[in-house]
Amino acid sequence: MKILGIDTSNMPLGIALMDGNVIKGEIITNVKKDHSARAMLAIESLLRQCGITPDELDLIVVAKGPGSYTGVRIGVTIAKTLAWSLGIPIAGVSSLEVLAANGRYFPGVIVPLFDARRGQIYTGLYRYEGGVLRCLEEDRIVAADEWAHQLSQQGEDVLLVGVDAPLYSELFRNHLGERVHVAPPSLALPRPSELVMLGKEKERENAHAFVPNYIRLAEAEAKWLAKQKGEGTDGDRCTISSNDHP
């Protein structure tokens, strides 16, 4: 089975190709450039270098969010278009789950996070059990201070993973002390190779039916809905994107 993985859900761009149980190649960049212009070029380059044509692909795996609203939308749109045109299924993986996979050998719990601004983070809680990544707490957007306090009640070592983790390391240490560990820069980026490995085990979906997981609405949509309900607007509640870089 040949699988193409696509992750544009945040500033890092990741593309990977898997053939059977072998990772044939991956491309990762962490630069503030337009994913809509670069993603397809990266896909074409990787396929060409690996000697695989699009019509040989059996599955498209995409990071389905949360993260940058624009970034998630770009990756999902590309994935759905490719899957539809090739007549193959699509599988979605949480962008946070992909990041959590970098903590494979950590003995405690893994906390992937993306900055959501205003003191909030996109996060979840994961752990490796018998070599399998398990989700202990579903992905959410939450005040970082509140999340740190909740984790402090569990009494376990915590690994913070992500390029935004250093922004919150001191806050978490105020709650958890020496039980907080921050993944090094080499493990801070979501790996598209982990994305395809996780996606291989996920449920296949039809391209037309597939939907991303934004966790909260885009600002314009939320304001429109609030106006229809006559509720006014709330900037903290409506703003979706933490890292709307792409």
Image (cartoon, rainbow, N blue to C red):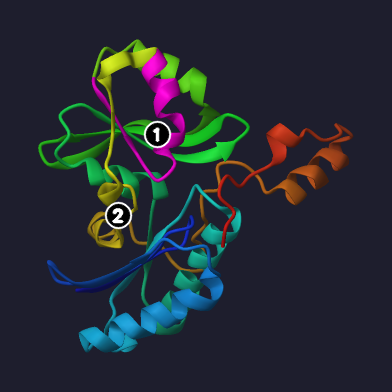
Magenta residue span: 157-174
User: Does the magenta portion include 166?
Assistant: yes
Q: Position of residue 39 (x, y in %)?
A: 46, 74
| Residue 198 sits above or below residue 87 on the image | above
Q: Which residue is mark 2?
A: 202
Point 20% across, 26% down: residue: 108
User: Does the magenta portion include 209?
Assistant: no
Q: Position of residue 236 (x, y in %)?
A: 70, 33
Point 25% across, 36% down: residue: 134
In this orientation, which residue lies closer to the viewer: 40 or 183? 183
Can you tell which quarter of the image residue 232 is in? top right
Counting other residues with Cα less than 10 Å from the Cα at mark 1, is it few (<14), some (14-19), or many (20 or more)? many
> On the rendered structure, is 176 left or right of 74?
left
**Could you tell me if residue 87 is visible in this image?**
no
Tell me, for residue 124, which label it has, or none: 1
Q: Position of residue 244 (x, y in %)?
A: 59, 54
- Looking at the rendered structure, the kind of residue marked 1 is Gly
Q: Residue furthest right?
A: 230
| Residue 220 sits above or below residue 127 on the image | below
What is the secondary structure assignment of the residue under circle 2?
Answer: loop
- Looking at the rendered structure, the kind of residue marked 2 is Lys
Q: Position of residue 90 (x, y in %)?
A: 38, 66
Point 57% across, 44% down: residue: 242
Counting other residues with Cα less than 10 Å from the Cα at mark 2, is it few (<14), some (14-19), or many (20 or more)? some
Q: Quadrant of the N terminus?
A: bottom left
> On the rendered structure, is 48 left or right of 96?
left
Q: State the CA–CA distance, disc 2 to disc 1.
A: 18 Å
What is the secondary structure assignment of the residue under circle 1?
Answer: strand
